[in-house]
Amino acid sequence: MSLPKEDRIYTYNDYLSWPEDVRVEIIDGRLYMQAAPSRIHQEILSELHRQLANYLVGKACKVYPAPFEVVLYLDEEDKDESRNVFEPDITVVCDTSKLDDAGCKGAPNMVIEILSPSTGRKDKLEKFNKYEQAGVQEYWIVEPQEKMVSVFTLEESQNYGRPSLYSDEEEIQVSIFDDLQIDLKTVFA
């Protein structure tokens, strides 16, 4: 069992061969090592997860905080040959047939990424494009420094439209649930 190197193209099959404590993501076959998140990042993640999890008690949808593996299949890829393996900060899955013991295989319904200085470009460009292409219905990009959230929802054209922007003084109506609002005052407190 060899550790990954950053100079080749990887697939989900390669990912499965690595030790569980190796935290990486694969985007288009390229390897990205995952650093430990900051305390503020974890506080934001915890509060978002708490609000979502409380709402989902007794409902079919499930919410998972990182580390949680999401394998996206694009362009008719074979399951084991997918070149896109992510570890979103928060993942909401309503189609439980996509879940297995390792995580989610296919597009989740909702993904939240909390930016850090080392992940901003990747989350705003590369992951954004992959989530859109895979059909993730709702994608949030949380910016801790600015205390802002950009919410992208998949339109009928299967593209994300312009984002809805929210500050720390607002509530977000979650588009995949008719009766859930996330209070950003407590998220950014």
Image: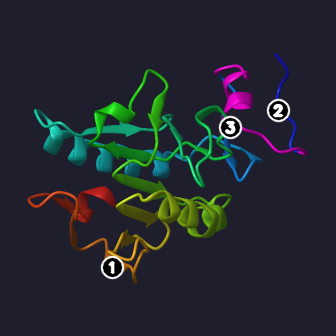
Residue range corresponding to the magenta coloring? 7-20
- Look at the image and name its color scheme: rainbow
The amino acid type found where label 2 is placed reads Pro
Please identify, in this view, whether the residue under mark 3 or under mark 2 is nearer the observer: 3
The amino acid type found where label 1 is placed reads Ser
Please identify, in this view, whether the residue under mark 3 or under mark 1 is nearer the observer: 3
Mark linked to residue 4: 2
Please state if 11 lies on the left or on the right of 38 as rendered. Answer: right
Mark linked to residue 81: 3
| Disc 1 residue crowd, few under 14, some 14–19, many 20+, Cα 10 Å | few
Quadrant in which residue 182 is drawn: bottom left
The amino acid type found where label 3 is placed reads Glu
User: Magenta stretch containing residue 45, yes or no?
Assistant: no
Determine the residue located farthest toward the front in the rendered image. Answer: 76
The residue pinned by badge 1 equals 164
Which residue occupies 47% across, 38% down? Answer: 66
| Disc 3 residue crowd, few under 14, some 14–19, many 20+, Cα 10 Å | some
